[in-house]
Image: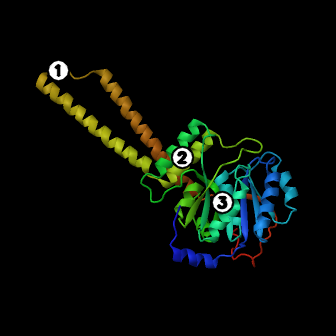
Amino acid sequence: MTQLPDHYRDSIKQQRTATPSISCVVPAYNEAANLPTLLEILSKQLQELTNAWEIIVVDDGSSDATFGVMLGWTRVPGVRFIKLSRNFGKEAALTAGITRAVGDVVILIDADMQHPITLIPQMLAQWQQGYDCAYAVRESREEESLVKRLGTALLYKLMNAGGHFKLPINAGDYRLMDRSMVTALLALPERNRFMKGLYAWVGFNAVAVPFTPHQRAAGKSSFSLRRLSSLGLTGLTAFSYLPLRIWSGVGAVVAMLAFAYGAYVTVEKLLFGNNLPGWPTVVAGIMFFNGIMLLSIGILGEYVGRIYEEVKQRPLYIISGEIGTGHITLHDSAATPRV
């Protein structure tokens, strides 16, 4: 938790209204069974907090009835629907929604009903106290598999090792952000986006709000272990040089060991006349060093591949359709939606 100086807190509090305009971004992939319940509860919650609100559902290339469900909901004032041309991934869907949001504050929430909507008033209260971001932190991961828990812990440890910023442990995408933080996020141009890292990188005054996730209401998660591993690798290569530094160290150690072993064999031959080791030692050494080199090249290739993706400068996502209107006007918010 970031502690704000009292004078700064008081200054920010005076500038913030009790009823800001609120944009709520909901990325959705095959969530047709969950969206009606989510939208009903979420819209009621927002109506209790402000008159100026909007819910932006971003369909990330769903193959179920998400489009049909949302066609009916877009007739409800306050609900907007963005359909991407295909599945670009959650990070792209979040960015698409953030880009279109015009509220003084922007809330990111999943469509699977695991994020408790009742947490929103607490987040808003923290914003009114002067914080720029209130992010939800899981109190426990006991319901997850052992492999996922270990993988998540390893990722956080690697990314926080020697970095210029710290990634909050067990924090996800569920958060409320001030317009200033949203503007900073939209100024970041990279295509390989790891949103959890970007939230932390832009900084701002943030506070953690603990929560216990609900059970998924319907369906199953689309995040397989393979996709989670891929996302973790994207985050690691986007925000850390640690893998490169590790293998630089490994290379130096192996080179020193090889030099020491060569010196030992040479001295043994000169002093004692022992025969030089034969083919088994040579073959084992060659295979070992080749394995080290190939692994090092693979790690380096991950970074080169990210560079290749960036220099092509393809759009992060493509919108095939957008319908619905929010309850926010330009009079309610100074933000201008980007195209």
Q: Residue at x 77, y 64 (%)?
A: 46
Q: Which residue is mark 3?
A: 95
> Dot 1 surroundings within 10 Å: few (below 14), some, or many (20 or more)?
few
Tell me if label 2 and label 3 are in contact, CB under 8 Å.
Answer: no
Q: Please tell me whether residue 51 is drawn above or below residue 271 in the rendered image.
A: below
Which of label 3 and label 1 is nearer to you? 3
Q: Position of residue 192 (x, y in %)?
A: 58, 54
Tell me if label 3 and label 1 are in contact, CB under 8 Å.
Answer: no
- Kind of residue at badge 1: Asn
Label 1, label 2: how far apart the Cα atoms are: 49 Å
Q: Position of residue 103 (x, y in %)?
A: 71, 70
Disc assigned to residue 274: 1
> Dot 2 surroundings within 10 Å: few (below 14), some, or many (20 or more)?
some
Left or right relative to 150: residue 101: right
Q: Residue at x 57, y 62 (%)?
A: 207
Secondary structure at numbered mark 3:
helix
Q: How many marks can you see?
A: 3
Label 2, label 3: how far apart the Cα atoms are: 19 Å
Q: Position of residue 64 (x, y in %)?
A: 80, 45
> Visible in this render: residue 304?
no
